[in-house]
Image (spheres, helix red, strand yellow):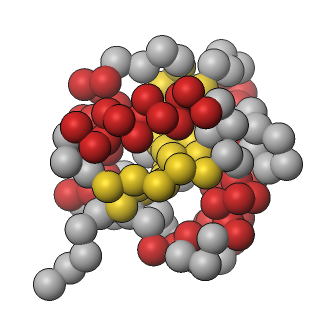
Amino acid sequence: MSKPPVIAIVDDDRAVREALLDLLQVEGLSARMFENGAAYLADAHCLDFHCVITDVRMPEMDGLELQRRLRACGSTIPVIFITSSVNEGTRERALSDGAIAWFTKPVANEELLFELRTALRDPGARK
């Protein structure tokens, strides 16, 4: 029997982390919160998550570097970006490096949940 999915929420804004956690819990999903990419990677179980929802701009390690490090160690964990950044070059880089979705804050809950559920059903579908 496979383990139920657990989503990592990586964002330096506590209010955003908590709002995403509440949304996912209402939808019956489990999640854990991290304040930046370094904190996430420091977790002994960082490669056991089923999806990462992250911001781009954070102290210590931004979301693009987090995604790069995950890919460098061979991880195929789906990554979804939710950010206030409107830089098209940054968006293109994130998507070309394997992110499955990019949303500008504020994101519509339905759109985020659609992408998340797609990633959880078929993690290899978007590679």
Percent across and percent down for residue 8 are 48, 54
Q: Residue furthest bottom?
A: 1
Residue visible at 40% across and 40% down in the picture: 21
Q: Is residue 47 above or below residue 32?
A: below
Q: Is residue 66 above or below residue 9?
A: below
Percent across and percent down for residue 25 are 28, 43
Residue visible at 69% across and 37% down in the picture: 12
Q: How many marks?
A: 0
Q: Is residue 4 above or below residue 81?
A: below
Q: Is residue 91 above or below residue 115?
A: above
Q: Residue furthest left?
A: 1
| Residue 115 showing in the rendered view | no
Percent across and percent down for residue 82 are 53, 30
Q: Quadrant of the N terminus?
A: bottom left
Residue visible at 19% across and 48% down in the picture: 28
**Along the line of sight, which residue is nearer the eye, 77 or 37?**
37
| Residue 113 showing in the rendered view | yes
Q: Is residue 122 left or right of residue 76?
A: left
Percent across and percent down for residue 51 are 42, 56
Q: Residue furthest right?
A: 60
Q: Is residue 13 left or right of residue 47?
A: right
Q: Is residue 11 left or right of residue 69?
A: left
Residue visible at 67% across and 46% down in the picture: 35
**Along the line of sight, which residue is nearer the eye, 84 or 99?**
84
Q: Is residue 127 left or right of residue 55?
A: left
